[in-house]
Amino acid sequence: MARGVPWKMIAANVLADILQIGDKEVLVIDSRSFLEYNSCHIVDSVNVCCSKLVKRRLQQGKVMVTELLSQACHHYKLVPRSRIIVYDQCTSDPLVLSPDCFLSVLLHKLVSVFFRIELLQGES
C-alpha cells in the first residue's frame, strides 16, 4: 500500500506488462472526464462519470460504486477479488489528493468493496 492510503501505487511499465499478458481479471478504470477519455485512453479501460452529481451521490450512499461500475463495464464480471487499477490525469502522490476530489471518493468507495485496488502512478 502507498504511504497512509489503503491502495497500492502501480507503475506504468507494470500496467503495460499486465495489459500485454491480457489478464482478464483486471479492470482498468479511467477516472477522468468523458471528454478526456474520448480523446485518449488506455485500451480496454472503462470510464466512470466524474461529475459533481455522481461524486455527491457516491458520498451520500445514494449510488453504490458497484452500480456505477456495472453501468460502465457490461463485459466484466465484478467480484470482491477483482483487481482494479484506477488512473487519472497525473496523480503521482496519493497523499496530495483532496479527500473531496472525485478520485479520492472513488478510491475509498472501491476499497470498501474490493480487495485489490491500485492507482496508476503519474509522472511528477
Image (cartoon, grey):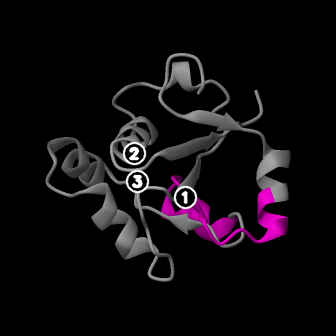
Asked if residue 26 lies in the magenta stretch, the reply is yes
Q: CA distance from mark 2 to mark 3?
A: 9 Å
- First in sequence, mark 2 or 3: give its number: 3
* Placement of the C terminus among the 4 image quadrants: top right
Contact between labelled residues 1 and 3, with CB atoms less than 8 Å apart:
no
Asked if residue 5 lies in the magenta stretch, the reply is no
Residue occupying the point 40% across, 41% down: 111
Q: Which residue is mark 3?
A: 50
- Residue 4 lies left or right of residue 69; in this view the side is right
Which residue appears farthest toward the front when viewing the image?
81
Q: Which residue is mark 2?
A: 106
Q: Is residue 38 above or below residue 28?
A: below
Q: Amino acid at mark 3?
A: Cys
Dot 3: element: loop
Contact between labelled residues 1 and 2, with CB atoms less than 8 Å apart:
yes
Q: Amino acid at mark 1?
A: Ile
Percent across and percent down for residue 12 are 79, 46
User: Between 47 and 84, which is closer to the camera in this rendering?
Assistant: 84
Percent across and percent down for residue 108 are 37, 37
Percent across and percent down for residue 57 are 20, 51
Contact between labelled residues 3 and 2, with CB atoms less than 8 Å apart:
yes
Residue occupying the point 59% across, 27% down: 1
Q: Amino acid at mark 2?
A: Leu
Residue occupying the point 39% across, 45% down: 106
The magenta region covers: 18-40
Q: Which residue is mark 1?
A: 29
